[in-house]
């Protein structure tokens, strides 16, 4: 049986989408601007695959500084344009798995109170704890602001962002992890009628002035409206191994094995371990650090270093691939660390399709992330999906 590895570089966009202005993102370009801010990127593995060939597909003359086009790229290369409404993790991953969201998730006001009073009241009643915050904020900032108060009162810190998220922060010495997770499950159920994309558990530790978020984050997604490619594969008896926050994003549906990791290093180690086992099926992984640590914090230098570290990981990883393996590298949205604000950016995402011992070529601009799902269906020989086109070259 065949094997495929799908690696999602969280937020690594490659140029403003045609409708970027509708989202306030005209001019955004995560990869190009990160490279410029860093004085050039050193990505020899991705360069050989053809990452540097992609920008010209989007705009003539566009380049990633330090990553020139490859004369004979080792992978097929292209860019994907999102069709669904939104620019968040859930929307991007779901479309990649074959879905299309014509109605975006609900967004909330930045100022207090962000969430409807009846939602907050129901949450407080069911959990037995009060809520503080209830506004849009950076997670690290609001924890520094309200962490001391939480330690005194035991209240939940609840906040949102420019995405459709309800985030719940809790000090692990005040509210134990399991209670935080139960609280998020309660919030998820209550939030469904408001069409909130994700509930996110944000545990932290430390003392006032020195708080630190941990990697025990959990995401609780809005219920999926239809089966994804993951479910089609598992129903066909094909193993699906999820790494990172994948199980959370897909509501634990269509996954036979899950390895929940909270950072790039742990995810990459697990990917390497799974590849060395040589088991057939799909390995799907999200590398979160680009978005979580650097994009939202507008840290271009950190973003560049994470890209270069990941390139080293990929260079070693591909040496363990078997001749009949398929490797897909892409992203779920943009998050330009040089752009205004702290929000995701509506961008094209890169697409690299690597098969050992085969040269690649251009697969152009793909209209819809769901081409990934259709191509995986073709690769594994399952029934075609209702959306998307197969980009795999003969």
Image: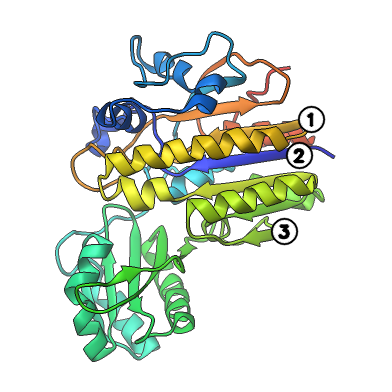
- Give the structural element (helix, strand or loop) at label 3: loop
Check the image and report above or below for 354 versus 224.
Answer: above
Question: Tag 1: Cα neighbours inside 10 Å, few (<14), some, or many (≥20)?
Answer: few
The answer to whether residue 104 is visible is no
Residue 249 placement, left or right of 212: right
User: Residue at point 32% right, 53% down?
Assistant: 163
Mark 2 or mark 3, whichever is nearer to me: 2
The answer to whether residue 148 is visible is yes
Q: Residue extending furthest left? A: 111
The residue that mark 3 highlights is: 256
**Residue 303 x, y percent position in the rendering:** 35, 41
In which quadrant will I find the C terminus? Answer: top right
**Residue 151 x, y percent position in the rendering:** 26, 86
Q: Are marks 2 and 1 in contact (CB under 8 Å)?
A: yes
Q: Earlier in the sequence, mark 2 or mark 3?
A: 2
**Residue 379 x, y percent position in the rendering:** 74, 32
Q: CA distance from mark 2 to mark 3?
A: 15 Å
The residue that mark 1 highlights is: 324
Q: CA distance from mark 2 to mark 1?
A: 8 Å
Q: CA distance from mark 1 to mark 3?
A: 22 Å
């Amino acid at each position: 049986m065949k094997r495929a590895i799908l690696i999602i570089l969280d937020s690594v966009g490659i140029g403003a989408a045609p409708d970027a202005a509708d989202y306030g993102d005209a001019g955004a370009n995560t990869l190009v601007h990160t490279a410029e801010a860093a004085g050039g990127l050193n990505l020899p593995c991705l360069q050989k695959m053809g990452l540097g060939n992609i920008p010209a597909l989007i705009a003539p003359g566009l380049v990633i500084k330090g990553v020139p086009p490859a004369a004979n790229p080792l992978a097929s290369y292209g860019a994907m344009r999102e069709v669904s409404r939104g620019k968040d993790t859930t929307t991007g991953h779901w479309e990649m798995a074959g879905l299309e969201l014509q109605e975006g998730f609900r967004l909330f006001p930045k100022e207090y109170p962000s969430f409807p009073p009846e939602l907050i009241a129901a949450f407080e009643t069911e959990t037995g704890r009060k809520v503080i915050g209830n506004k849009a904020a950076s997670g690290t900032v609001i924890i520094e602001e309200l962490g001391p108060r939480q330690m005194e009162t035991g209240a939940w810190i609840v906040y949102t962002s420019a995405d459709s998220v309800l985030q719940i922060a809790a000090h692990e010495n005040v509210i134990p992890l399991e209670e935080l997770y139960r609280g998020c499950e309660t919030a998820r159920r209550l939030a469904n009628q408001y069409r909130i994309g994700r509930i996110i558990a944000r545990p932290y530790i430390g003392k006032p002035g020195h708080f630190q978020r941990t990697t025990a984050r959990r995401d609780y997604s809005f219920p999926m409206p239809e089966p994804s490619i993951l479910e089609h594969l598992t129903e066909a008896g094909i193993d699906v191994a999820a790494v990172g926050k994948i199980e959370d994003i897909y509501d634990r549906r269509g996954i036979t094995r899950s390895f929940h990791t909270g950072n790039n290093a742990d995810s990459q180690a697990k990917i390497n371990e799974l590849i060395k086992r040589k088991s057939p099926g799909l390995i799907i992984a999200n590398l979160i650090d680009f978005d979580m640590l650097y994009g939202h914090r507008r840290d271009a230098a950190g973003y560049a270093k994470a890209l270069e570290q990941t390139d080293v990981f990929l260079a070693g990883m591909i040496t363990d691939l078997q001749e009949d393996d398929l490797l897909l590298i892409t992203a779920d949205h943009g998050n330009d660390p040089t752009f205004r604000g702290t929000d995701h950016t509506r961008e094209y995402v890169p697409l690299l399709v690597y098969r050992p011992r085969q040269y690649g070529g251009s697969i152009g601009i793909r209209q819809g992330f769901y081409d990934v799902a259709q191509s995986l269906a073709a690769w594994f020989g399952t029934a075609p999906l209702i959306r998307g086109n197969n980009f795999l070259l003969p």
